[in-house]
Amino acid sequence: MSNEKQLASEVIKTIKSVKHALDEALESNDVEALEEKIRASNELLEELSLYCNEIVGPDKVMRMSLNIFLKDSISSWKKKFWGVEIKGSSEGTMDVECSKIKLKKTFENLILNAMEAGSTEIEIKVLKDCIVITDDGDGISKEDSIKIKESGSTKGRGRGHGLPMVKSFIATLGWKLELENNKDKDGLSVTLRVK
């Protein structure tokens, strides 16, 4: 029943967001703006469709190589997040058993957070016992670090589930989230550590 409530909530939230974006574009009488809003709305509805499939569809948990998953995903993220350079590297191999969609959303939320912090470069590195996502953004303040420990987020509002979703999902994998400002350069390192 909680999955059905969660699904209904996501559907309503997405539809309201799409309607609002299209209404704004229509009011502006700007054809280019309307085309852009339609394209963005289609992407959002496609994501919602994938989410609905996972909630009400067959069990999609699968065992996969994290290295292969990231190699394939980074190719698509380079197109989706064109304002940032995303690189991947590997010093180890790791297999994981989970929902591919949730895993992808987890990394996408971390990429979006890095972009919001002004990052232009992100590196995702697979090690033996962890994944490290390093960016060149503004890093994290002590105040934000405290907020994340207390409430799971630095914001009162935002799109999607953000960092709380990341923490919740990786907890189901038995992983731990660590955030630390880079010592020798600007930015933040987010570590997803296997416990």
Image: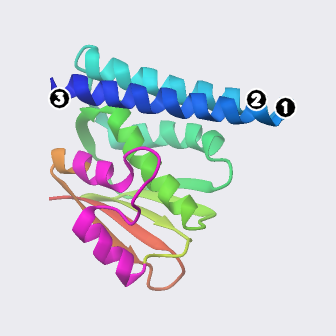
Real-space CA distance between mark 2 and mark 1, rounded to the nearest whole angstrom: 5 Å
Disc number lying in front (2 or 3):
2
Instruction: Tell me if residue 62 comes above or below residue 176 in the rendering.
Output: above
In the rendered structure, which segment of residues is drawn in magenta? 141-169
Amino acid type at circle 2 is Leu
Real-space CA distance between mark 2 and mark 3, rounded to the nearest whole angstrom: 36 Å
Secondary structure state at the residue bearing disc 1: loop
Amino acid type at circle 1 is Asn
Q: Earlier in the sequence, mark 2 or mark 3?
A: 3
State yes or no: discs 2 and 3 in contact (Cβ < 8 Å). Answer: no
Secondary structure state at the residue bearing disc 2: helix
Q: Earlier in the sequence, mark 1 or mark 3?
A: 3
Reading the image, the residue beneath label 3 is: 2
Image x and y of residue 152, in percent:
28, 61
Residue at position x 33%, y 37% in the image: 102
Q: How many C-alpha atoms fall within 10 Å of the one at disc 1: few (<14), some, or many (≥20)? A: few
Q: How many C-alpha atoms fall within 10 Å of the one at disc 2: few (<14), some, or many (≥20)? A: some
Image x and y of residue 61, in percent:
24, 27
Horizontal side of 37 relative to 4 (left or right) equals right
Disc number lying in front (1 or 3):
1
Reading the image, the residue beneath label 1 is: 29
Image x and y of residue 8, in percent:
32, 24
Real-space CA distance between mark 1 and mark 3, rounded to the nearest whole angstrom: 41 Å
Residue at position x 48%, y 76% in the image: 139
Horizontal side of 69 relative to 130 (left or right) equals right
Residue at position x 52%, y 24% in the image: 45
- Quarter of the picture containing the C terminus is bottom left
Disc marking residue 26: 2
Q: Is residue 62 visible?
A: no
Image x and y of residue 81, in percent:
62, 47
State yes or no: discs 2 and 1 in contact (Cβ < 8 Å). Answer: yes
Residue 160 highlighted magenta (yes or no): yes
